[in-house]
Image (cartoon, rainbow, N blue to C red):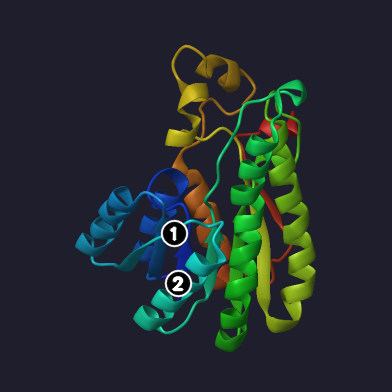
Amino acid sequence: MGRLTGKVAIITGAASGMGAQTARLFAQEGAKVIATDMSEDKLQEVVNEIKADGGEAIGVKHNVVSEDEWKNVIAQGLEAFGNIHVLVNNAGISTDATIEQFTMENWNKVMDVNLTGCVLGMTLVYPEMKKAGSGSIINISSIAGLVALNFTNGYTASKGALRALTKAAAVECAKDSVRVNSIHPGIIETPMTQMITAPEVRGIFQAQTPLPRLGKPEDIAYGALYLASDESSFVSGLEMVIDGGWCAR
């Protein structure tokens, strides 16, 4: 307990899945949490859980594609807690389409949420981390940013770009003691992956995962906890792969 005592963290996509579990764990470890999501009701449930457990959190409705909404999140966070030390860019969407099935509408949507949303967060939160004297930015990419997955070309492109952006930002931001790292989840059982973790198809993905189970949101949350904490103070530009061995095959 207390690995994040004194830190303030923004976590996007915090209404469910990996984001919700990360918000809960960060609060349990002493962080003050600014939880954001488009799903306001579910987000408030997570915030209420944190508070009932003795933690500190606020919830802000947030479309990560909007620069104005990012500015609002930061303003509310500063008003509530005074500083921002950690940003977890977790919000994301997926699409199923082959190259032949691409539409520009789908392409632009997945790029806006998965890549532009992260760029906005990094750009706008970075100055606050400089004021605080240090910071940790954690971008949730995917194994799709490292290896090819079928029928996810747009998603793969967005996550691969986020991987590269993370490395570039890690080098640029190091002078201000702001660390930038990426996490690359494998198949994690969340609301976003219901179609591929359903009983009738999960065996296909389990067969490609050497460890004898699929991932859980807490697997990713604990990785983010390490990167947010001072335990990783000399870690930047890392690709943290949490995939049950998928990429090792």
Say whether residue 190 is visible.
no
Q: Quadrant of the N terminus?
A: bottom left
Q: How many labels does the image show?
A: 2
Q: Position of residue 247 (x, y in %)?
A: 72, 34
| Residue at which label 2 appears | 72
Q: Which residue is drawn at 39% across and 51% down?
A: 20
Indicate the quadrant where residue 75 lies: bottom left
Q: Badge 2 local density, few (<14 within 10 Å), some, or many (20+)?
A: some
Decide: is 234 above or below 127.
above
Tag shown at residue 62:
1
Q: Badge 1 local density, few (<14 within 10 Å), some, or many (20+)?
A: many
Tag shown at residue 84:
none
Q: Where is residue 249 in the image (x, y as percent from the top left)?
A: 74, 28
Q: Position of residue 24 (x, y in %)?
A: 36, 56
Amino acid type at circle 1 is His
Amino acid type at circle 2 is Asn
Instruction: Tell me if label 1 and label 2 are in contact, CB under 8 Å.
Output: yes
State the residue in front, 116 or 22: 116
State the residue in front, 30 or 104: 104
Say whether residue 147 is visible.
yes
